[in-house]
Image (tube, rainbow, N blue to C red):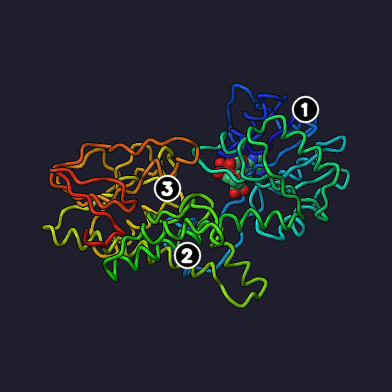
Amino acid sequence: MKKIGFIGIGKLGLDCAEVMAEKHEVRGYDIYPRHSDSVKVCGIEELVNESEWIFIAVPTPHAEGYDGSVPSSHMQPRDFGHAAVIDAIKNVNKYATGSKKIVLISTVLPGTTRKHFVPLLDPKHQFLYNPYLIAMGSVKWDMVNPEMIMIGTEDGNPNALAGELRDLYDTVMQNNPRYEVGTWDECEAIKIFYNTFISAKVGLVNMIQDFAMRIGNINVDVVTNALARSTMRIMGPKYMTAGMGDAGACHPRDNIALRWLAEEYNIGYDLFDTVMHAREVQAKNLAHFLVDLSVMNDNMPIVIHGKAYKPDVEYCIGSYSTLVGHYIEQEGRDVVYVDPLADNQDKVVDRIAQPSVILWAHDRQITYEYTGDQDRTQPYCVIPKGSMIIDPWRKLQSTADIEVIHYGNTRRS
Ligand SMILES: NC(=O)c1ccc[n+]([C@@H]2O[C@H](COP(=O)([O-])OP(=O)(O)OC[C@H]3O[C@@H](n4cnc5c(N)ncnc54)[C@H](O)[C@@H]3O)[C@@H](O)[C@H]2O)c1
């Protein structure tokens, strides 16, 4: 049993600390009051002194307006904030009496750790960069079933500390994960480009959806399924279902921040701007489709079913639903949302009073089927007869009372 401390026990850190606490003695420190049944929440001094391993999972926040839930591609590119990580490092320096094994989890842009963090850390400590591929709604499952574990060392060699971290993870992992060892900078890059690959894939398949809507006689699923089965060059089928755009607390902002990096290193082009711009225009196209449908049907109200960035979680950060809502309003139309969990209740209603044009933003199966969970999203409220549901995932079927339109399928039969 190892003695482990987590600095920052928020959305990521607390669940990860609790997973570790199933096998180890784990302490947690946070600047906000936190509670756990298995992790001992304590002061920073106790945490630093009592822990052999110290995991840092504090926020590396984006600036206001840089999360992707509203248009941002016109704004000045900016790096993430580093103040909380620097504060955590200073606390370790201040309180540690002996040498500690420091593991930084927080997401940062390539080059950050070497430039801004390691020079601040007292050289008596050992340091690894170890970002996580974890998604909201499935943190604990993701933690013990990762696609890979990235361990960053100064020179990219698997040193003794990297081996010790691997031994530590072996005590909790369920899927015998693949380990990728690289420099700090390489691991920063693997993590952030993993996210932007996903954004790029979703942007591409939604581009095909746009073509399907314009050209006619195309069911986007026929096209993307053929591409998804092309395992020789295009790899796995995940994120190959066109639908709502890439969303959440990480992906949009990663692309937005990488625009800054491309400028910083004079790369000469900005693919991330293109991806994010495409994402916004895709949202605008979907919004326009909803407005048109409403106009053609006696100006039926427009409702978005699902406001959080995905089903089963409350987080509206980086939500594609609110991005679509933004463009509906830009066309001079009102929009409301139904979502009992949403942590932003602005314009959220608990019932739909009259027949409406409804965007079916959430589909649980699409989001969570990789965890084995196959249940589809059930209506969050009664859907009035005469409504039209626009299903960007093309899974729902029309009934006698409600017409379902499969956005992205313009085949005649
Ligand atoms: N949430 C995810 O799914 C996810 C996945 C992978 C990586 N990440 C990365 O992990 C990091 C943390 O993300 P999160 O979603 O848990 O953020 P969060 O804001 O939910 O949690 C961070 C916690 O750190 C605390 N904190 C802030 N400043 C502190 C300080 N100086 N000292 C101690 N505690 C402090 C906050 O009170 C909060 O509880 C970020 O860099 C994020 O990009 C998050």
Quadrant of image for the C terminus: bottom left
Q: Is residue 88 left or right of residue 127?
A: left
* Residue occupying the point 83% across, 41% down: 161
At x 85% / y 46%, what residue is drawn?
A: 159
Q: Are marks 3 and 1 in contact (CB under 8 Å)?
A: no
User: Disc number at residue 276?
Assistant: 2
**Is the residue 293 above or below the residue 57 in the image?**
below
**Residue plotted at (19% across, 60% down):** 293
350 shown above or below 393: above
Q: Which residue is drawn at 36% across and 53% down?
A: 322
Q: Distance between the residues labelled 3 and 2?
A: 16 Å
Mark 2 closeness class: few <14, some 14–19, many ≥20 residues within 10 Å: many
Is residue 63 visible in this depiction of the protein? no
- How crowded pointer 3 is (Cα within 10 Å; few <14, some 14-19, many 20+) is rated as many
Label 1 sits on residue: 2
Question: Up-down: is 41 above or below 108?
Answer: above
- Give the distance between the C-alpha atoms of the residues marked 2 and 1, in whole angstroms: 43 Å
As drawn, the label of residue 309 is 3
Question: Judging from the image, what secondary structure is the residue with disc 2 in?
Answer: helix
How far separated are the C-alphas under marks 3 and 1? 37 Å
Q: Disc 3 on helix, strand or loop?
A: loop
